[in-house]
Image (tube, coloured by chain):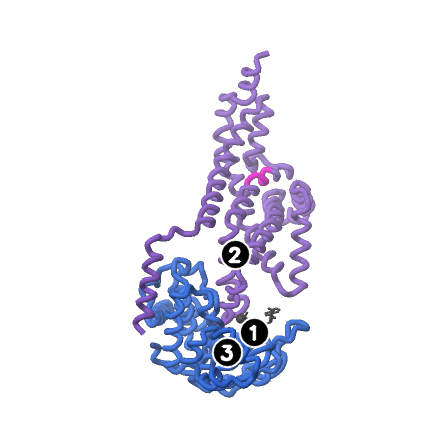
Chain colours: A purple, B blue
């Protein structure tokens, strides 16, 4: 048996790729992006709430946040998605019919919020105590000091981890297929899988994989960019350091 | 420098403060008339920073009272109180995610509710007064320590405080940058600000302070005019301290 031709038939059947391409672009890519983007937005908002609760000085806010985080980080994503997506659908059916997207997005967001909450919490906690103290000394209330001074700095520090979480969401969005999708609701993975079954080879799935990479690889590079900027700081002008000292001395002399 | 200083008197009376079982302030008394400068000196851990934080209620005193312009600060809203008391820290604590100008306009806009143009004008004027008008657009991180501390002073002054608290404002600076910041503080004292200055700079205390208070183990052990304190110290603890730092 010719290994090369077997692999070629399995993965590089251009015909079946070409056939599924329009659907993958128009239906699959769009649905994956909708799923991922909505979960990113909702998960980030929820995650910020969880982080602020976890950092609260009030125990009745801290504990629910901690339990929430433990539960949603501790369960397999697929289990959470099935429990929420199927479990709640008899209730939500009355509002938006059997469409699995709202519940799928909710489940993905709840899972993401547990991770994102921890990311935000660690970032916010890493901001020096003096920052909040300086804000409060100026007259900012605790919430205003957190919102205007501490949280923006904390978030900046965890941007790389946050983007990693977004990448995970893009990939995890494929799990909603377990909830059962109508033809028009299929995302990249499901379209790839269906076409693979019909054609009897895996080329359409390979194509789906390429689409995932098209989304995730730029995000990976964004992570690296943030990482680098955080490590190196903003570029500074070497020569300015000398000016600073000279100017400082001039200022001192002048008294 | 600053032309319009509206300073208030500050009276600390029997202030006590403990962290758990660690009694850090054990009845501190300090009276600073309006427009005067008090320097607080003393060994590490004697409670100097804690005293400043008790004055503006970043820490709540357990007992005693603090009066600003004769009125107890314990009765007012702490957030509103702090708007009347400026504070400068050892490590500047500028907001690194904002430009120098934004560091000053942020509290003006959000707390004093000034419009953008008004806040900008006020902030630029204050920056000019500390000699850094040309650094408005820079990030704090690109400035020298001395420049950062001058921005921190400008940020506090822009709020038009009635009292200024300085907690070792020059301790984190390279030696050649100390003079500029001390000069600025001396100018401010000259302009009539009420100031409480925690410092290790004995030269500054001697030349600028109207009174010097020596703290040890959570109490003011001895206080008086600098001349008397530095040349005719009564308590053995102060004499020992001075022999170590002078
Ligand atoms: N937030 C805090 N929690 C618990 N203990 C504290 C806290 N802040 C200060 N202390 C304790 O209070 C005591 C006095 O501290 P403080 O910072 O007021 O001293 P200081 O005179 O400013 O010293 P230094 O010259 O080193 O700055 C120290 O024993 C310190 O450990
Ligand atoms: Mg101190």
**Up/down of A253 relative to A41, above or below:** below
Q: Alpha-carbon distance for marks 3 and 2? A: 35 Å
Q: Residue under label 3, please give it.
A: B40
Q: Would you say B126 lies left or right of B67 here?
A: left
Do the residues at pointers 3 and 2 share their chain? no
Q: What element does badge 1 sit on?
A: helix
Q: Residue under label 2, please give it.
A: A154
Q: What element does badge 2 sit on?
A: helix
**Up/down of B238 relative to B116, above or below:** below
Q: Alpha-carbon distance for marks 1 and 3? A: 12 Å
Q: Alpha-carbon distance for marks 2 and 1? A: 27 Å
Label 2 neighbour load within 10 Å: few <14, some 14-19, many 20+: many
**Up/down of A65 relative to A11, above or below:** below
Q: Main secondary structure of the magenta part?
A: helix
Q: Which residues are magenta?
A: A170-174
Q: Position of residue B192 (x, y in %)?
A: 39, 83
Residue, x 42% and y 83% (percent of image)? B7
């Amino acid at each position: 048996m010719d290994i090369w031709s077997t692999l070629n038939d399995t993965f590089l059947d251009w015909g079946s790729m070409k056939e599924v391409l329009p659907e993958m672009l128009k239906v699959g890519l769009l649905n994956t992006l909708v799923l991922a983007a909505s979960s990113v937005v909702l998960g980030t908002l929820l995650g910020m709430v969880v982080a602020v609760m976890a950092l609260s000085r009030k125990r009745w806010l801290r504990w629910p946040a901690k339990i929430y985080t433990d539960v949603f980080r501790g369960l397999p994503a697929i289990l959470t998605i099935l429990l929420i997506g199927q479990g709640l659908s008899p209730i939500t059916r009355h509002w938006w019919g059997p469409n699995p997207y709202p519940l799928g997005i909710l489940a993905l967001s709840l899972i993401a919020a547990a991770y994102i909450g921890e990311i935000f919490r660690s970032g916010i906690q890493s901001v020096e105590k003096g920052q909040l103290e300086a804000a409060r000394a100026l007259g900012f209330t605790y919430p205003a000091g957190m919102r205007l001074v501490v949280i923006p700095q904390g978030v900046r520090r965890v941007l790389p981890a946050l983007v990693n979480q977004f990448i995970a969401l893009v990939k995890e969005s494929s799990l909603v297929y377990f909830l059962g999708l109508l033809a028009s609701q299929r995302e990249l993975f499901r379209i790839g899988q269906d076409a693979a079954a019909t054609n009897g080879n895996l080329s359409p799935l390979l194509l789906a994989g390429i689409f995932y990479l098209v989304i995730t690889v730029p995000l990976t590079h964004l992570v690296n960019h943030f990482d680098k900027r955080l490590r190196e700081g903003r570029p500074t002008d070497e020569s300015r350091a000398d000016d600073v000292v000279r100017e400082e001395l001039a200022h001192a002399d002048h008294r | 420098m600053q032309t319009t200083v509206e300073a208030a008197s500050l009276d600390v009376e029997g202030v006590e403060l403990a962290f758990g079982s660690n009694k850090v302030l054990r009845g501190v008394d300090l009276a600073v008339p309006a427009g005067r400068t008090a320097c607080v000196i003393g060994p590490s851990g004697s409670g100097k920073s804690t005293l400043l934080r008790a004055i503006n209620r970043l820490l709540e005193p357990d007992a005693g009272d603090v009066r600003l312009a004769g009125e107890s600060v314990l009765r007012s809203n702490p957030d509103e109180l702090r708007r009347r008391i400026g504070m400068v820290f050892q490590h500047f604590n500028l907001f690194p995610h904002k430009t120098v100008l934004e560091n000053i306009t942020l509290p003006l806009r959000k707390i004093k509710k000034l419009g953008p143009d008004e806040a900008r004008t006020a902030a630029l004027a204050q920056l000019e007064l500390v000699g850094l008008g040309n650094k408005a657009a820079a990030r704090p991180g690109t400035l020298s320590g001395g420049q950062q501390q001058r921005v921190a002073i400008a940020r506090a002054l822009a709020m038009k405080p009635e009292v200024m608290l300085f907690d070792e404002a020059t301790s984190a600076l390279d030696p050649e940058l100390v003079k500029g910041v001390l000069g600025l503080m001396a100018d401010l004292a000259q302009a009539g600000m009420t100031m409480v200055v925690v410092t290790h700079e004995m030269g500054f205390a001697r030349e600028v302070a109207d009174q010097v208070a020596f703290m040890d183990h959570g109490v003011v052990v001895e206080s008086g005019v600098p001349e008397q304190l530095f040349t005719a110290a009564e308590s053995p603890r102060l004499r020992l301290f001075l022999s170590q730092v002078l």
